[in-house]
Every structure is written in structure tokens, then in C-alpha cells.
Image (tube, rainbow, N blue to C red):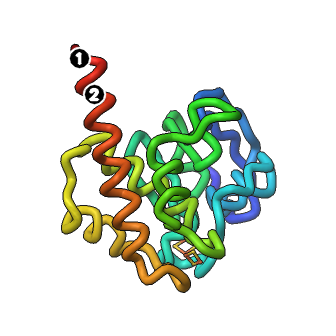
Amino acid sequence: MPRLTADQKHRVHFTLNGRPVSAVAENRMLLTDLIRHELGLTGTHVGCEHGVCGACTVQIDGQPARACLTLTAQVEGADVRTVEALAPAPDRLSALQAAFRRHHGLQCGFCTAGILMSLDALLRDRPEAGSDEIREQLSGHLCRCTGYASIVEAALSAAEEIRKEEVSENV
Ligand code: FES
Ligand code: FES
């Protein structure tokens, strides 16, 4: 079998924000580069580019993942979500996004997309999460501006909203 080199290309198929994607990428291409530069979704930010800051966090099969550490070949067949998919409609924010706005959970916004994707995954699985669990989830994210307290408040408020929505859906 011929040896693959980094500058050779491959075709990758995956779902991005609910839509099928088929893209050609260099073997060494990172998911951040594919999403931002080839597919034009620039909501996913890039900070450190080596897995430390969390700015590039997306969801892969429902779990938060560092897009700057993910090769495009690794998402073959996967379900990838970026921050562009969070709002349920163009004129509506998700409960988490709305809570960030209410509680001033962002300032410059550089870290925000990654944090939203992490907290969205947590609260989808565990809307009963308390501040310790939320802080644990935030431990993989660096924010230079907020001091984190307003982000935790926003997440707690969103969790309460999500629990209320679940109760009203089950009545
Ligand atoms: Fe990926 Fe910092 S850009 S973790
Ligand atoms: Fe500026 Fe977090 S809001 S880095």
C-alpha cells in the first residue's frame, strides 16, 4: 500500500450543523481550518492552536472537542456541531445564549463560542448540573475578560430554564 504523505488529499464526509458535507482536505488539515477557511463558518475561534484555551471547541457526536486538535479525517461519518447551530431560529437565541446575554457572560467574546459549545453539551445531558459541575466543565476554557463568575451565573440560569422547559413539555 502506498505511503500517505501530509500534503496528499482525502475526501471526508460528515454532518455539519445538520447538513451533509463532502469535502476534499489535505491529510494534515485540521478541523478548524476546514470549518473556518473552506466552509466559511467563522464562529469557531482559534486561539492557542494546541488544545489549551478551548476557544475552538465544537461538538463531535454530542461531545465537546477541540477542533484545533482534530484532523479532518477523524470526523469521517461524525455529527459535528458548531456555535452557528445553537440558535433554534435566526431571530431566537437558545436558553444558554439568552442567559449569557442576561448575565453578561461575555465581554470581548473571543472565548464565548467554545464555552457555549461545552456548556450546551453539559446542560443537554445534565440540566441539573450545579455550579461545581459547571466550573469543572469550564476548566478547559480560558477567558481573559469575565473572571468566570458571570459565565457560571449564566449557565445556572440556563439550566433552570431548561429544567422548566422539560417540565412543561412533560405536563
Ligand atoms: Fe484549540 Fe486553543 S485554539 S484549544
Ligand atoms: Fe473575552 Fe472571554 S469574554 S476572553
Quadrant where ligand 1 appears: bottom right
Asked if residue 141 lies left or right of residue 56, the reply is left
Q: Are marks 1 and 2 in contact (CB under 8 Å)?
A: yes
Residue topped by disc 1: 170
Hey, what amino acid is under mark 1? Asn
Residue 154: x and y in percent read 40, 59
Task: Inspect the image, locate mark 2, and give the three-letter code of the amino acid beneath it.
Answer: Glu
Dot 1: few (<14), some (14–19), or many (≥20) neighbours within 10 Å?
Answer: few
Q: Is residue 15 visible?
A: no
The residue to which callout 2 is attached is 166
- Residue 31 at x, y percent in the picture: 62, 56
- Residue 7 sits in quarter: bottom right
What number is the disc on residue 118?
none
As drawn, 91 above or below 122: above
**Image spot of residue 8 (x, y percent):** 74, 56
Determine the residue positioned at 57% across, 31% down: 88
Depth check: 131 or 119 in front? 131
Quadrant in the rendering for residue 95? top left
Alpha-carbon neighbours of circle 2 within 10 Å: few (<14), some, or many (≥20)?
A: few
Give the image quarter of residue 48. bottom right
Mark 1 within 8 Å of ligand 2, using the beta carbon:
no
- Rendered-image quadrant of the C terminus: top left
Between marks 1 and 2, how big is the CA–CA gap? Answer: 6 Å
On the rendered structure, is 154 left or right of 27? left
Q: Which secondary structure, mark 1? A: helix
Question: Which residue is drawn at the image coordinates 19% and 47% (left, top)?
Answer: 128
Depth order, front residue of 62/101: 101
Task: Write the residue at 19% across / 58% down.
Answer: 130
Camera-nearest residue between 84 and 31: 84
